[in-house]
């Protein structure tokens, strides 16, 4: 294993995992708000599952075959979910 | 990167476990001590060795003390730099709070004071703190360090590294790694049930260490998983601050709507008005809690908008009779004393969260369960420490042959964290009994003795680590175990000499906060002394046998 490969994999797992979790929480809260749940409950519920999500993607990032895929899924997924959640909360209330 | 899933989990377990294990063992150990933080405070502050007291009368005792309180000098100095023009000579109090638990003989009061002339932050404020003896209202000297609740407990969740919340982030990441280490550990070992009953102390060190590592990991697996997870959820708003950033508009709107629905005054009216009897409010709150089938004492008393027409008083129930951390707060109008709002039971989601938070923070009164928490935490320490030893045992012969220093450094840092941490913990207790009572900044000197002892232990661990390079045992383990035993016995003796509270007296009076800590120190000292003797004997044997032992089954090679 080359050193750069390990550094890349660890960074993807730790930082990418955090980004993915962040996006998951933002999108999750946005979806629950859209479904009519009060903000405090939506936030608490997402916080309760957030670290289980982080745990799963963190472990997966070391089991995955390709480091590039880990970067793409975790940072790409995190950014996509954050963007989608942000867009949903900016929609006019119906 | 790895040919199989199992190998990837082994890599994760080994390397993250080693590096973050050095942090995790600190978190587990000081978490275990924090279960009895209030009791450690009693040992460290002999003036407070008396029975826990209920919340004092606000009208006759607390109100005059609150009125005399002043902001902390260091906070005023910092605030002076934030404001435009000079800071007003006296700051007006905004809010007052008083907090106690079923284990507190002393009562902590705090006040918040408005800083009016900060152009950047209209809500800027500073704090004042006092601790009183609730039996007579006497103030305790404010330079007495509450070693349990103000030093060991913050060590558990933030390593006492407050700069930019760095300690919280390190501990949080370590908690995530703990979860990952548990998952990967189960993947590696598979025969999870058999591990529970496997300990072969007579086999060679590498085998018996791994047995003990697996046993302690598995026996308290649900405990470790729940504590790492709930530790993260308790501070989730620090690690994932969505409500202060991306979703701030939604969070603010929800908070405003909530305040409006509750009808509690968000801001002061700016008109002075006297406060009605708070003692009468306490009587009414207790009546209402009893009517809901949960009679109890006031744990937390909070006066909002002190001295203003919009003031209101919030009373929270002490949560000593259940796991879940609910306060059943009742809000009273300050000027009239009538009930403004009795908060409804929490929603389903909040109820689950309150339960998990309460499970971690254990405010309940159940001494046996508290001891289970201590043993659960210590089994985590044992699991991590045996993990370090296994790491070193597995590699030290290879490294000795190859002439690389990896095992040596891992072992030296393990000594510095495992035994060095205990040396530091005992050093602060010994310093607490040795430093003169009237010394200025006494608490800072106590903290300095903790960090100083830890640095000395770390230097000693590095200095004595050379034998590991030749696949032998570092003498630092035995030497620091000897130091632990000496310090533990010295702490008990010094407590006796300086306060007269020896075990015969404290046990006779059943004063468990002091008797319990003294007994724990004696047990820890005895174990450390036995460990020191055993390690010395083993060092002698190991020299004769170097190279004879080898891994005896496939699993050892795999782990």
Image (spheres, helix red, strand yellow):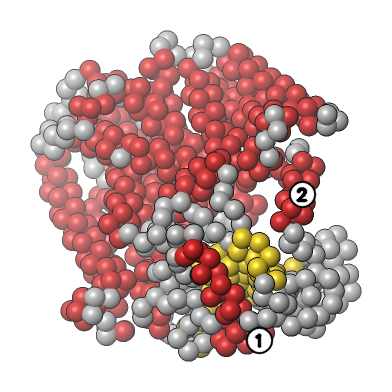
Q: Which chain carries label 2?
A: B
Q: Where is residue B83 in the image (x, y as percent from the top left)?
A: 84, 69
Q: Is residue A23 left or right of residue B468?
A: right
Identify residue for label 1: B68
Q: At x 56% / y 51%, what residue is drawn?
A: B345
Residue A71, quarter of the rendered image: top right
Of the image marks 2 and 1, the number of the one nearer the N terminus: 1
- In front here: A7 or B343? B343
Q: Which labelled disc corresponds to residue B257? A: 2
Q: Name the element at disc 1.
A: helix
Q: Position of residue B75 (x, y in %)?
A: 69, 71
Q: Which labelled disc corresponds to residue B91? A: none
Q: At x 70% / y 71%, what residue is drawn?
A: B333
Q: In this view, does B220 lie to the left or right of A2?
A: left
Q: Can residue B198 be seen in this view?
A: yes
Q: Where is residue B534 in the image (x, y as percent from the top left)?
A: 14, 50
Neighbourhood count class around disc 2 (C-alpha, 10 Å): few under 14, some 14–19, many 20 upward: few
B101 in relation to B548, above or below: below
What distance separates the C-alpha of mark 2 from that of mark 1?
Answer: 36 Å
Q: Which chain carries label 1?
A: B
Q: Which residue lies furthest to the front in this view?
A: B291
B64 in relation to B237, above or below: below
Q: Can residue B378 be seen in this view?
A: no
Q: Name the element at disc 2.
A: helix
Question: Are marks 2 and 1 in one subunit?
Answer: yes
Mark 2 or 1: the one toward you: 2
B428 in relation to B533, above or below: below
Q: At x 35% / y 28%, what residue is drawn?
A: B185
- In front here: B538 or B124? B124
């Amino acid at each position: 294993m080359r050193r750069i490969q390990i550094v890349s994999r660890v960074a993807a797992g730790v930082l990418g995992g955090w980004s993915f979790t962040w996006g998951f929480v933002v999108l999750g809260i946005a979806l629950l708000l859209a479904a009519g749940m009060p903000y405090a409950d939506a936030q608490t519920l997402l916080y309760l599952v957030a670290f289980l999500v982080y745990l799963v993607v963190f472990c997966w990032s070391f089991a995955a075959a390709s480091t590039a895929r880990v970067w793409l899924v975790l940072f790409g997924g995190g950014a996509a979910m954050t963007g989608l959640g942000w867009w949903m909360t900016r929609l006019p209330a119906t | 990167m790895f040919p199989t899933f199992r190998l990837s989990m082994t890599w994760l377990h080994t390397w993250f476990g080693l590096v973050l294990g050095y942090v995790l063992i600190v978190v587990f150990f000081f978490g275990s001590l924090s279960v009895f933080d209030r009791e450690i405070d009693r040992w460290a502050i002999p003036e407070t060795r008396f029975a826990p007291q209920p919340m004092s009368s606000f009208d006759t005792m607390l109100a005059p003390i609150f009125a005399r309180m002043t902001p902390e000098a260091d906070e005023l100095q910092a605030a002076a730099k934030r404001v435009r023009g000079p800071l007003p000579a006296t700051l007006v109090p905004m809010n007052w709070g008083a907090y106690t638990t079923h284990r507190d003989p002393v009562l902590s009061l705090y006040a918040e004071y408005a800083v009016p002339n900060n152009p950047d932050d209209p809500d800027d404020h500073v704090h004042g703190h006092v601790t009183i003896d609730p039996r007579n209202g006497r103030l305790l000297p404010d330079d007495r360090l509450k070693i349990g609740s103000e030093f060991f407990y913050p060590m558990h969740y933030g390593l006492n590294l407050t700069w930019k919340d760095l300690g919280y982030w390190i501990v949080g990441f370590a908690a995530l790694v703990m979860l990952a280490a548990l998952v990967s550990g189960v993947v590696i070992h598979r025969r999870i049930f058999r591990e529970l009953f496997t300990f072969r102390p007579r086999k060679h060190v590498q085998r018996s260490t791994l047995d003990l590592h697996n046993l302690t990991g598995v026996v308290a697996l649900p405990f470790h998983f729940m504590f790492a997870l709930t530790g993260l959820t308790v501070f989730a708003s620090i690690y994932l601050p969505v409500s202060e950033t991306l979703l701030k508009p939604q969070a603010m709107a929800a908070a405003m709507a909530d305040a409006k629905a509750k009808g509690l005054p968000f801001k002061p009216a700016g008109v002075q008005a006297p406060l009605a009897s708070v003692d009468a409010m306490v009587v009414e709150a207790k009546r209402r809690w009893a009517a809901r089938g949960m009679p109890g004492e006031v744990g937390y008393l909070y006066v909002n908008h002190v001295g203003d027409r919009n003031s209101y008083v919030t009373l929270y129930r002490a949560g000593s009779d259940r796991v879940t951390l609910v306060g059943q707060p009742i809000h009273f109008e300050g000027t009239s004393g009538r009930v403004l709002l009795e908060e409804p039971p929490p929603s389903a989601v909040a109820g689950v969260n309150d339960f998990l938070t309460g499970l971690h923070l254990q405010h309940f009164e159940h001494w046996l369960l508290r001891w289970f928490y201590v043993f659960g935490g210590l089994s985590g320490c044992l699991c991590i420490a045996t993990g370090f030893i296994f790491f070193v045992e597995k590699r030290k012969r290879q490294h000795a042959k190859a002439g690389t220093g990896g095992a040596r450094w891992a072992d030296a840092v393990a000594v510095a964290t495992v035994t060095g941490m205990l040396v530091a913990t005992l050093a602060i207790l010994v310093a607490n009994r040795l430093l003169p009572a009237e010394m200025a900044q006494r608490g800072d000197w106590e903290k300095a003795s903790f960090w100083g002892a830890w640095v000395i232990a770390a230097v000693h661990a590095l200095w004595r680590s050379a034998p590991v390079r030749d696949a032998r045992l570092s003498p630092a383990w035995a030497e620091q175990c000897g130091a632990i035993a000496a310090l533990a016995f010295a702490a008990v003796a010094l407590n006796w000499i300086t306060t007269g509270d020896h075990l015969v007296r404290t046990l006779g009076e059943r004063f468990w906060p002091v008797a319990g800590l003294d007994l724990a120190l004696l047990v820890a000292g005895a174990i450390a002394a036995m460990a020191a003797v055993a390690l010395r004997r083993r060092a002698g044997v190991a020299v004769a046998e170097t190279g004879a032992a080898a891994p005896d089954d496939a699993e050892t090679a795999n782990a």
